[in-house]
Image (spheres, coloured by chain):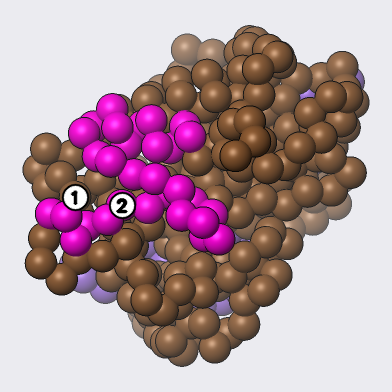
């Protein structure tokens, strides 16, 4: 679960450190969502994925992957 | 000159991060400022570095940035307005940013002493590495006169100060240049000065300059001395992993985006999850991919580890 939506009993703020990867998966592999976590999915180009991401770190990951794949 | 820094020890918690995106840093500061409102809670000393960003203080205008927002975007530099004092400045990798989130109520209601304490810590840090820096009347921060060491030199800023004060609680803080990309300062009028430059330990010392962590250790030590901070234990950050999941489509790469259910936030994301005890980052990424999508894939690191 994402730490940003957890409410803790004590007032000391909580922070999180995230390590970022990317994963290539086969084109025709079927996606099976965990229904308690996600309700729908879609495959997007870089621009749409960047716009849909909520957090700055996630947007930066998209940009990093884009630059990496465009250089390859 | 009145007193420098504070003498009476005050409990504080140290929070040291690597990269923090600027907007995430603003959220961190808001949360910690709320926390220190309760005088029973310790002050906070947050040490980190930011992604490349121009920040506009309350006295800045877009005219202080000499390149277009599009140019900044193409070169990976964000632009953010802030509520700190001062004009425009730059933050980026290689620069130590420190946010002292302090509650000055109850005997320390003197922002001047805090500012001079912050400057003193930076002056002592510079001296640790053989660099003579000093204050300059009317220009907060610490300055090095590079005319002494090279032709064409002059007053150059090594460390900046920009605080925000609300009900005696401080936010924002200082930026100390170890080895940032100084060319980025050339795209702005840093801190409103057109007749002064910007330097770094790297520009002054070349290959003998300390690395970021060594300089940060020294700055932390001197800040604790100059502000009389008595460091208490603090909760370590939790650890998570993101795995941007993609496939090669007919028209190019396609990113898998998933919509979180409403009671988990109702926003779009790719694969992400918290590390469990004993797991490596790679194991977490594979487990989360399997649990959230049923997929398996080839995992590759991205050059990004950040805190929020």
- Name which residue lies at 38% across and 57% down: B157
Q: Position of residue B177 (x, y in %)?
A: 35, 49
Q: Is residue B83 left or right of residue B182?
A: right
Residue range highlighted in magenta: B120-149
Q: Residue placed at 28% from the left, 41% from the top? A: B132
For this rendering, which residue is in front, B225 or B65?
Answer: B225
- The subunit letter for the residue under badge 1 reads B
Q: B144 or B280, which is in the foreground?
A: B144
Q: Position of residue B172 (x, y in %)?
A: 64, 48
Chain coloured brown in this rendering = B
The location of residue A22, given as percent across then percent down, is: 39, 50
Secondary structure category for the residue under label 1: helix
Front disc: 1 or 2: 2
Give the letter of the chain under mark 2. B
Residues packed near mark 2 inside 10 Å, few (<14), some (14 to 19) or many (20 plus): many
| Residue holding disc 2 | B144
> Would residue B203 be found to the left or right of residue B32 on screen?
left
Q: Check the rendered structure and report the hue given to chain A.
A: purple
Mark 2 residue element: strand
């Amino acid at each position: 679960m994402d730490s940003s939506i957890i409410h803790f009993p004590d007032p000391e703020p909580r922070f999180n450190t995230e390590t970022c990867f990317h994963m290539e998966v086969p084109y025709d592999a079927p996606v099976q969502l965990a229904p308690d976590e996600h309700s729908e999915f879609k495959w997007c180009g870089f621009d749409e994925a960047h716009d849909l991401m909520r957090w700055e770190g996630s947007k930066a990951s998209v940009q990093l992957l884009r630059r990496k794949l465009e250089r390859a | 000159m009145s007193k420098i820094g504070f003498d009476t020890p005050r409990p504080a918690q140290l929070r040291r991060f690597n990269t923090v995106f600027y907007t995430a840093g603003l959220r961190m500061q808001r949360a910690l400022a709320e926390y220190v409102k309760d005088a029973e809670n310790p002050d906070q000393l947050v040490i980190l570095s930011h992604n490349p960003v121009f920040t506009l203080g309350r006295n800045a205008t877009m005219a202080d940035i000499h390149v277009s927002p599009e140019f900044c975007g193409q070169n990976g530099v964000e632009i953010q307005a802030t509520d700190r004092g001062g004009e425009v400045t730059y933050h980026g990798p290689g620069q130590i940013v420190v946010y002292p989130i302090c509650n000055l109520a109850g005997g320390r209601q003197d922002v001047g002493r805090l500012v001079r304490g912050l400057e003193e810590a930076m002056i002592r840090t510079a001296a640790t590495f053989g660099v003579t820096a000093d204050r300059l009347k009317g220009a907060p921060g610490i300055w090095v006169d590079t005319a002494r060491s090279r032709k064409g030199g002059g007053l150059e800023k090594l460390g900046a100060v920009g605080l925000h004060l609300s009900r005696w609680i401080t936010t924002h803080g200082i930026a100390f240049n170890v080895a940032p990309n100084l060319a980025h300062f050339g795209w702005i009028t840093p801190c409103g000065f057109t007749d002064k430059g910007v330097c770094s330990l790297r520009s002054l010392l070349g290959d003998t300059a300390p690395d970021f962590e060594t300089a940060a250790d020294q700055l932390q030590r001197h800040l604790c001395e100059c502000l009389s901070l008595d460091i208490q234990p603090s909760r370590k950050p939790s650890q998570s992993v993101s795995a941007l999941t993609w496939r090669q489509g007919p028209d190019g790469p396609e990113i898998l985006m998933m919509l979180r259910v409403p009671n988990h936030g109702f926003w779009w994301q790719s694969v992400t999850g918290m590390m469990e005890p004993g797991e490596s980052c790679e194991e977490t990424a594979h487990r989360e991919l399997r649990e959230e999508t049923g997929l398996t894939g080839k995992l590759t690191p991205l050059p990004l580890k950040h805190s929020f």
